Image (cartoon, coloured by chain):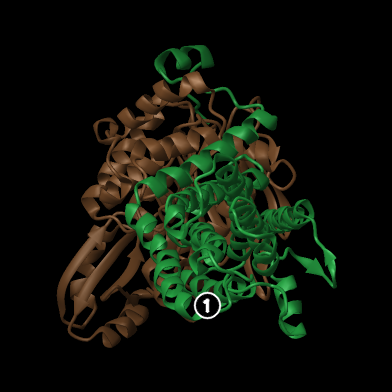
């Protein structure tokens, strides 16, 4: 189907941003030393990355990490403070219209006109993007079929559910057959079932369209759908690789325990095993190699009554934690970060 | 380092997708963009009948309630055979497009709040074509609104003369365009709909009252004379009243009293210059709006 790089070793440095690909085709998205300041706040602090044709590339990080700012620069909606970015070999700063013709966009917040029907929304888009007149009707049918909305095309968009609106936006983003589809938090605000169905549609369109997908998310499970992901925190990429390789790079299992006295257990873990533990999401959490073999030792040697134990294989959550020292939920809860506050403020304003 | 590469030819056989060739851009593309932005305004106006009715309420009140109420008082100053309603009709006609034009520009603020503006601003078209489409759209629906009010001309003893009606429609179109451009210029800066409403409410009534819609422009105190000459609406209401009175069979003295024509310190401003001023103002404000929408973060 699509070309994809499968690296087996965990490469941690961001200088490996190019991934591993046949060097013949230039990257569809190339970003180099990109920074963006809003007054005093540095939203993006030097990002390098390359995304290749046919890839699904995910940007993973907490709210306010710089994901949306980067996507806005790539979509020509914001100007970089320094550094360069090209999309489909066009410079995002100097060849804006060429970039725009080659990208499709689905934003976090809806950009549909609720007073128009689905078909009218698509027709508006086709005219603005200069889709050849004879191609509009068949292409419209094609993209609406793809997201299962063809028989609802005459309905007013304001009568659509949240999931249907998101599907319609994806269809609209594809209407002018872009080379890159940007999805900024494509499933945010949707219930779990609808999120799954959106992903089913995204996977389907990957099978049918020759397209590169660049998405941002702060859901760990969604990042698993990507061929490669970049973990971004505080405006910097801290890791970039395939999900498998990133998980393998952690190498440890995650153990979560509930004890009678968490503070005593933290002390005991440090003293008896040399393990650093902390309370995350309501449970005492730590990472250890060979987690299942470790559990019997834990019971005999901890010295603090244990109520329950769970051991899990490393997930992207653990990857995020091993690179940033916190879970993604912790990162979002710390509202003291000025950039995060600003991000929340800007979302409210839009 | 394994890449299961599929050759592009084989891939396109699997992918039954219609490759839409990248548009070349250029003037035809811009025209398509202007046209679709314009058409969207019409579609939305058509689906919003309530707005069409409610925006007629105010001019109808002015013409029939205020007009009839004041006519007993005004009769003493009016030349015989001329109804006060006939006198204020051109000004109230201008008013009938005032709110619709500015509010249709206000939909930009609305679009910004609901996100649709972004769909337009990320498209590979010049910002100019979006702004032009918006100005023409607002002008069209406001003129349409004016035409509905024009149908009531008979109640104010204004004759349904085709030449007169055509002249009035043309003047309404010009006025609507300039007012929409003014609204779009403001909407480029204002991010909240409430703020936009408050600001337009604050500006619209002075514009109307200073235009000479309800009183003749001659023999006013000098401070008011100056203010009326600054109001752009004056330069449309004047020619419209002139057009109406030149199609009435009233004595020259009555016409001289009620529709004396616009003067600058005694110099009579010709109709073409009057309308030209309005057109230039509209174009200038549209140009400012385009410049504001071109700014990137």
The x and y percentages for residue B130 are 60, 46
The residue labelled by disc 1 is B74
Query: On the picture, is B230 further left or further right than A133?
Result: right
| Residue B211 shows in the view | yes
Describe the element under mark 1 as helix, strand or loop. Answer: helix
Query: On the picture, is A290 further left or further right than A103?
Result: left
Q: What is the display colour for chain B?
A: green
| Residue at 46 percent of width and 25 percent of height | A136
Disc 1 residue crowd, few under 14, some 14–19, many 20+, Cα 10 Å: some
| Residue at 76 percent of width and 78 percent of height | B226
The x and y percentages for residue A250 are 42, 56
- The image shows residue B35, relative to residue B65, as above or below, that is above
Query: On the picture, is A184 further left or further right than A116?
Result: right
The x and y percentages for residue B200 are 54, 71
- The image shows residue B125, relative to residue B248, as above or below, that is above
Front-most of residues B294 and A1: B294
Q: What is the display colour for chain A?
A: brown
């Amino acid at each position: 189907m699509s070309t994809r790089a499968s690296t087996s070793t965990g490469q941690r440095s961001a200088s490996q941003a190019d991934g591993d690909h046949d060097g013949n085709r230039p990257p569809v998205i190339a970003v180099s030393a990109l920074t963006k300041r809003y007054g005093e706040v540095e939203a993006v602090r030097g990002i390098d990355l390359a995304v290749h044709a046919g890839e699904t590339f995910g940007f993973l990080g907490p709210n306010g990490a710089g994901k949306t700012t980067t996507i806005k620069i790539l979509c020509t909606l914001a100007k970089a403070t320094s550094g360069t970015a090209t999309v489909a070999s066009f410079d995002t700063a100097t060849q804006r219209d060429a970039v725009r013709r080659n990208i499709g966009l689905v934003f976090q917040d809806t950009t549909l006109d609720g007073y128009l029907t689905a078909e009218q929304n698509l027709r508006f888009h086709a005219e603005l993007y200069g889709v050849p007149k004879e191609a509009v009707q068949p292409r419209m049918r094609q993209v609406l079929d793809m997201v299962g909305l063809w028989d609802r095309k005459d309905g007013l968009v304001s009568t659509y559910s949240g999931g249907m609106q998101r599907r319609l936006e994806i269809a609209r983003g594809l209407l002018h057959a872009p080379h890159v589809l940007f999805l900024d938090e494509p499933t945010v605000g949707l219930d779990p079932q609808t999120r799954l169905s959106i992903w089913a549609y995204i996977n389907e369109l990957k099978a049918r369209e020759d397209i590169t997908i660049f998405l941002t998310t702060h859901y760990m499970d969604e990042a698993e759908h990507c061929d490669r992901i970049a973990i971004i925190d505080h405006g910097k990429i801290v890791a970039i690789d395939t999900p498998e390789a990133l998980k393998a790079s952690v190498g440890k299992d995650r153990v979560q325990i509930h004890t009678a006295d968490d503070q005593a257990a933290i002390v005991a873990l440090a003293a008896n095993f040399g393990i650093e533990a902390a309370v995350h999401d309501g449970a005492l959490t730590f990472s250890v190699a060979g987690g299942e073999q470790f559990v019997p030792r834990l019971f005999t040697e901890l010295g603090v009554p244990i109520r329950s134990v769970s051991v899990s294989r490393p997930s992207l959550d653990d990857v995020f934690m091993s690179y940033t020292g916190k879970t993604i939920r912790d990162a979002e809860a710390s509202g003291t970060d000025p950039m995060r506050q600003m991000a929340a403020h800007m979302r409210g304003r839009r | 380092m394994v890449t299961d590469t599929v050759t592009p030819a084989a891939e396109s056989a699997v992918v039954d997708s219609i490759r839409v060739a990248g548009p070349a851009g250029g003037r035809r593309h811009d025209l398509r963009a202007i046209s679709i932005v314009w058409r969207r305004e019409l579609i939305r106006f058509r689906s919003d009948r309530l707005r069409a009715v409610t925006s007629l309420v105010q001019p109808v009140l002015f013409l029939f309630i205020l007009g009839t109420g004041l006519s007993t008082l005004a009769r003493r100053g009016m030349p015989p055979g001329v109804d006060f309603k006939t006198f204020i009709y051109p000004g109230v006609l201008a008013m009938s497009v005032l709110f619709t034009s500015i509010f249709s520009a206000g939909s930009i603020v609305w679009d910004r709040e609901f996100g649709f503006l972004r769909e337009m601003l990320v498209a590979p078209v010049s910002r100019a074509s979006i702004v032009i489409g918006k100005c023409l759209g607002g002008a069209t629906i406001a003129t349409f609104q004016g035409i509905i009010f024009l149908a009531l001309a008979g109640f104010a003893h204004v004759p349904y003369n085709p030449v007169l009606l055509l002249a009035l429609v043309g003047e309404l179109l010009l006025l609507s365009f300039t007012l929409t451009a003014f609204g779009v210029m403001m909407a480029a800066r204002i991010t909240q709909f409430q703020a936009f409403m408050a600001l337009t409410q604050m500006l619209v009534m002075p514009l109307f009252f200073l235009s000479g819609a309800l009183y003749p422009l001659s023999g006013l105190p000098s401070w008011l004379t100056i203010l009326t000459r600054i109001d752009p609406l004056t330069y449309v209401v004047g020619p419209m009243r002139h057009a109406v009175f030149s199609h009435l069979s009233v004595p020259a003295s009555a016409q001289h009293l009620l529709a004396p024509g616009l003067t600058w310190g005694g110099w009579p401003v010709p109709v073409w210059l009057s309308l030209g001023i309005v057109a230039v103002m509209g174009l200038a404000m549209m140009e400012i709006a385009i410049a504001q929408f071109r700014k990137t973060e």
